[in-house]
Amino acid sequence: VAAEEMLEESGFEALSLRDAARRAGVSHAAPYRHFPAKVDLLFALAGRGFAALDSEMARAATLSADPIAQLAEAGLAYVRLAVWHPRRTQLMFGGILDMQEAPSGVRDVAQSSFQGLVRIIEAGQRSGAFHHGDSLEVALMAWSLVHGAAMLILGGQFKYAGQISEDDLRGVMRAIHRTLMLGIVRDDCRDDLARALGSPEGNLAGGPEKCD
Amino acid sequence: VAAEEMLEESGFEALSLRDAARRAGVSHAAPYRHFPAKVDLLFALAGRGFAALDSEMARAATLSADPIAQLAEAGLAYVRLAVWHPRRTQLMFGGILDMQEAPSGVRDVAQSSFQGLVRIIEAGQRSGAFHHGDSLEVALMAWSLVHGAAMLILGGQFKYAGQISEDDLRGVMRAIHRTLMLGIVRDDCRDDLARALGSPEGNLAGGPEKCD
DNA sequence: ACCTGAACACCGTTCAAGT
DNA sequence: ACCTGAACACCGTTCAAGT
């Protein structure tokens, strides 16, 4: 009875178990043989989303030997998935569902997709591309930046009203990638600031500048 | 009849106009004298959230003369507001409401809060602290990173189960600030990568490294 | 095992009627 | 102007009953 899910995907997510049953041609009580409650149907849909994310993260890690390129690919895949499945993404992250109490299966696959990101970060740290801070923290930063951009694009807060074009998407991803890699501070001010913030590599060179 | 809103705040957001009327001691039809539809009540609540954000952004800009410190303060205020009002925040950004068709008043104040961020970025570019890319793009990057972290914290994806402590929050903000300012790439690889990405300042110094 | 149909307690919304 | 009470068309969920 996976047909029901497909129908939901192709239409709306926040609405109507009864309606889904109707257009599946069964009685309004039939879904309860497959899902104990509506929330379980929604968890199943969200689970599909996390599974898609998981496989995209794994794919991104194979497309190149360069962790920086892997990370760029993972970010692009993340946002693309969000743009292609906006309702499902908002189900996954919009707070309609409390993922804390999701079935362990979908929690596991969600966890696994994040682990895919962590693995890319750790490969980058080993290769010397990324600095050697806590890999989990670095991964959370990368996730936050990409996730935030995805959510804001979905909310229409990213200037692109309605649908975003593939070209615009590429432009945004370029900006995200540069920001995540290099930050927004001018090079002249880096050493100053790195000392003040306690750079994880203990960088000590460079003279004072007028950067406050 | 702002009392209704306060009751909603102190409990749940995703639920029941009828119930709100009940505990306000009026009939279930009374709210319709004040809000044409439930969605308008929700827009009003979201509007309060954006107004709070707007004033926090303005406040952050006055607490220091240093744009970098202003940005850190703005980010902290953003996440703190999200953690203190999780339901309202998910109303504002969770996709329940389509902000594209919000009343112009709440759209304006939302726009104004973003403008507050843009002003901080532009001050930082003038002072030489931030690189001279498109200020709107830089602002969107800062917003995305902080917004993404806030949403993931709310969703419980940020290791901190349930409520996050003020100390943990400070730790997260520190990581966010360092990432946004400096990026995650090792210093040895910066010039290489900056050339590959086309740094907005046209940085040309530095020799090749093994940073594929 | 899987589905049905009626029923229950809720919604959001409308509307004639009251003051 | 503001509120009420009844009514309408929907929900999610339960349950006895069918096959």
Image (cartoon, coloured by chain):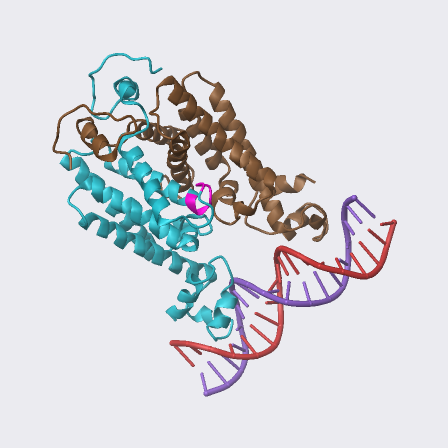
Chain colours: A brown, B cyan, C purple, D red
Q: Residue at x 27, y 52 (%)?
A: B56
Q: Nearer the viewer, residue B27 or A179?
A: A179
In the rendered image, the vertical position of residue A210 relative to residue B1, given as above or below:
above
Residue B31 lies in what quarter of the image?
bottom left
Q: Residue at x 51, y 50 (%)?
A: A96
Q: Is residue B160 visible?
A: yes
Residue C5 lies in what quarter of the image?
bottom right
Residue B71 lies in what quarter of the image?
top left
Q: Give the main secondary structure, helix, strand or loop, of the magenta stretch.
A: loop
Q: Nearer the viewer, residue B197 or A130?
A: A130
**Where residue A83 sits in the image (x, y, percent)?**
46, 36
Q: Is residue A159 visible?
A: no
Q: Which residues are magenta?
A: B153-159
Q: Residue at x 52, y 67 (%)?
A: B18
**Magenta-colored stretch includes residue B156:** yes
In the rendered image, the vertical position of residue A207 relative to residue A85, given as above or below:
above
**Where residue C2 sits in the image (x, y, percent)?**
77, 45
**Where residue A187 sits in the image (x, y, percent)?**
20, 26
Which quadrant: the C terminus of chain A?
A: top left
Q: In the shown orientation, is residue A117 left or right of residue B183?
A: right
Which quadrant: the N terminus of chain A?
A: top right
In the rendered image, the vertical position of residue D4 relative to residue A180, given as above or below:
below
